[in-house]
Image (cartoon, grey):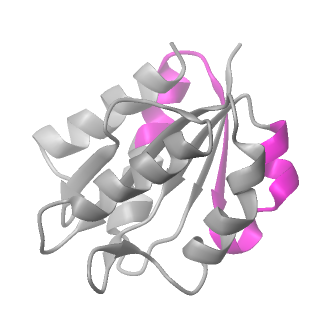
Amino acid sequence: MKKLTIIYWSGTGNTETMARLIESGAKESGADVKLLNVCEATEDDVKDAEILALGSPSMGVEVIEECEMEPFVSSIEGIVNGKKIGLFGSYGWGTGEWMENWVERMESCGADVLEEGLIANGLPEGPEADACVEYGKKLVE
Protein backbone atom coordinates (compact mmCIF):
# COMPACT_ATOMS: atom_id res chain seq x y z
CA MET A 1 0.00 0.00 0.00
CA LYS A 2 1.38 3.39 -1.05
CA LYS A 3 1.56 6.14 1.56
CA LEU A 4 0.73 9.71 0.56
CA THR A 5 1.13 12.77 2.77
CA ILE A 6 -0.79 15.87 1.67
CA ILE A 7 0.25 19.21 3.21
CA TYR A 8 -1.64 22.34 2.22
CA TRP A 9 -2.54 25.94 3.09
CA SER A 10 -5.95 27.35 2.20
CA GLY A 11 -7.41 30.78 2.81
CA THR A 12 -10.86 30.54 1.22
CA GLY A 13 -11.25 26.75 1.20
CA ASN A 14 -10.56 26.22 -2.51
CA THR A 15 -7.15 24.64 -2.02
CA GLU A 16 -8.45 22.61 0.93
CA THR A 17 -11.20 21.27 -1.34
CA MET A 18 -8.52 20.29 -3.87
CA ALA A 19 -6.58 18.53 -1.09
CA ARG A 20 -9.64 16.55 -0.03
CA LEU A 21 -10.41 15.56 -3.64
CA ILE A 22 -6.81 14.44 -4.16
CA GLU A 23 -7.09 12.48 -0.90
CA SER A 24 -10.27 10.85 -2.21
CA GLY A 25 -8.61 9.76 -5.46
CA ALA A 26 -5.59 8.33 -3.65
CA LYS A 27 -7.81 6.42 -1.22
CA GLU A 28 -9.88 5.04 -4.13
CA SER A 29 -6.60 3.58 -5.39
CA GLY A 30 -5.98 1.93 -2.03
CA ALA A 31 -3.41 4.36 -0.63
CA ASP A 32 -2.94 5.28 3.00
CA VAL A 33 -3.33 9.08 3.15
CA LYS A 34 -2.28 11.60 5.79
CA LEU A 35 -3.88 15.05 5.28
CA LEU A 36 -2.36 18.02 7.13
CA ASN A 37 -2.78 21.75 7.20
CA VAL A 38 0.70 23.24 6.90
CA CYS A 39 0.43 24.68 10.43
CA GLU A 40 0.28 21.06 11.70
CA ALA A 41 3.05 19.69 9.46
CA THR A 42 6.67 19.06 10.40
CA GLU A 43 9.83 18.26 8.49
CA ASP A 44 9.46 14.70 9.81
CA ASP A 45 6.12 14.43 8.00
CA VAL A 46 8.01 15.17 4.78
CA LYS A 47 10.92 12.82 5.60
CA ASP A 48 8.50 10.01 6.46
CA ALA A 49 6.33 10.50 3.36
CA GLU A 50 6.68 7.92 0.63
CA ILE A 51 4.86 10.32 -1.70
CA LEU A 52 4.23 13.99 -0.92
CA ALA A 53 1.64 16.46 -2.19
CA LEU A 54 1.92 20.17 -1.39
CA GLY A 55 -0.90 22.64 -1.96
CA SER A 56 -1.05 26.42 -1.89
CA PRO A 57 -3.15 29.03 -3.62
CA SER A 58 -1.62 31.74 -5.74
CA MET A 59 -1.09 34.89 -3.70
CA GLY A 60 0.03 38.43 -4.46
CA VAL A 61 2.09 38.57 -7.61
CA GLU A 62 1.71 34.86 -8.45
CA VAL A 63 3.58 33.31 -5.52
CA ILE A 64 2.68 30.61 -3.01
CA GLU A 65 1.21 31.77 0.32
CA GLU A 66 3.96 33.76 2.02
CA CYS A 67 3.38 33.52 5.79
CA GLU A 68 3.04 29.76 6.37
CA MET A 69 3.51 27.80 3.15
CA GLU A 70 6.58 29.63 1.83
CA PRO A 71 8.59 29.22 5.06
CA PHE A 72 7.59 25.54 5.22
CA VAL A 73 8.59 24.91 1.61
CA SER A 74 11.91 26.67 2.22
CA SER A 75 12.50 24.46 5.27
CA ILE A 76 12.07 21.23 3.29
CA GLU A 77 14.09 22.08 0.19
CA GLY A 78 17.03 20.06 1.48
CA ILE A 79 15.01 16.89 2.12
CA VAL A 80 12.91 16.44 -1.03
CA ASN A 81 15.71 15.13 -3.25
CA GLY A 82 14.48 11.95 -4.96
CA LYS A 83 10.99 12.23 -3.47
CA LYS A 84 7.87 11.92 -5.66
CA ILE A 85 5.89 15.15 -5.22
CA GLY A 86 2.60 16.52 -6.49
CA LEU A 87 1.98 20.27 -6.37
CA PHE A 88 -1.49 21.78 -6.49
CA GLY A 89 -3.41 24.96 -5.75
CA SER A 90 -6.13 27.35 -6.71
CA TYR A 91 -5.93 30.78 -8.25
CA GLY A 92 -8.24 33.64 -9.08
CA TRP A 93 -6.13 35.64 -11.49
CA GLY A 94 -2.96 35.36 -13.54
CA THR A 95 -1.68 32.68 -15.85
CA GLY A 96 -0.44 29.98 -13.50
CA GLU A 97 3.13 31.27 -13.51
CA TRP A 98 3.31 30.67 -9.73
CA MET A 99 2.83 26.94 -10.30
CA GLU A 100 5.40 26.84 -13.09
CA ASN A 101 7.90 28.54 -10.75
CA TRP A 102 7.04 26.18 -7.88
CA VAL A 103 7.50 23.09 -10.06
CA GLU A 104 10.85 24.41 -11.29
CA ARG A 105 11.91 25.19 -7.71
CA MET A 106 11.08 21.70 -6.42
CA GLU A 107 12.73 20.03 -9.42
CA SER A 108 15.87 22.09 -8.78
CA CYS A 109 15.87 20.56 -5.26
CA GLY A 110 15.89 17.08 -6.84
CA ALA A 111 12.19 16.27 -6.39
CA ASP A 112 10.37 14.13 -8.94
CA VAL A 113 7.36 16.39 -9.59
CA LEU A 114 4.25 14.84 -11.15
CA GLU A 115 3.33 16.58 -14.41
CA GLU A 116 3.26 20.39 -14.28
CA GLY A 117 1.36 20.54 -11.00
CA LEU A 118 -2.40 20.94 -10.82
CA ILE A 119 -4.24 24.25 -10.69
CA ALA A 120 -7.91 25.16 -10.41
CA ASN A 121 -9.49 28.53 -11.02
CA GLY A 122 -11.46 29.15 -7.83
CA LEU A 123 -13.44 26.31 -6.28
CA PRO A 124 -12.82 23.08 -8.21
CA GLU A 125 -16.11 21.85 -9.63
CA GLY A 126 -17.05 19.54 -12.47
CA PRO A 127 -14.03 18.75 -14.68
CA GLU A 128 -11.62 20.52 -12.29
CA ALA A 129 -12.89 18.43 -9.36
CA ASP A 130 -12.53 15.28 -11.47
CA ALA A 131 -8.97 16.31 -12.34
CA CYS A 132 -8.15 16.55 -8.63
CA VAL A 133 -9.42 13.03 -7.98
CA GLU A 134 -7.42 11.73 -10.96
CA TYR A 135 -4.31 13.56 -9.73
CA GLY A 136 -4.63 11.72 -6.41
CA LYS A 137 -4.80 8.41 -8.29
CA LYS A 138 -1.76 9.27 -10.43
CA LEU A 139 0.28 10.24 -7.37
CA VAL A 140 -0.04 6.76 -5.91
CA GLU A 141 0.37 4.72 -9.12
User: Is 112 within the magenta?
Assistant: no
Identify the image quadrant of the N terminus: top right
* Image coords of residue 89 (percent x, y): 35, 58
Q: Is residue 70 above or below residue 1?
A: below
Left or right of 7: which side holds 66?
Answer: left
Residue drawn 30% across and 52% down? 100
Residue drawn 23% across and 43% down? 129
Count of marks overlaid on the render: 0
Residue sitting farthest toward the front: 108
Residue drawn 31% across and 38% down? 116
* Image coords of residue 97 (percent x, y): 23, 61
What span is colored magenta in the figure? 22-48
Question: Between 13 and 74, which is closer to the camera in this rendering?
Answer: 74
Q: Is residue 28 above or below residue 110?
A: above
Left or right of 42: which side holds 62?
Answer: left
* Image coords of residue 58 (percent x, y): 31, 72
Question: Between 49 and 108, which is closer to the camera in this rendering?
Answer: 108
Residue 40: quadrant of the picture: bottom right
Residue drawn 52% across and 70% down? 9
Left or right of 76: which side holds 93?
Answer: left
Left or right of 133: which side holds 37?
Answer: right
Question: Between 90 and 59, which is closer to the camera in this rendering?
Answer: 59
Q: Is residue 3 above or below residue 60?
A: above
* Image coords of residue 57 (percent x, y): 36, 69
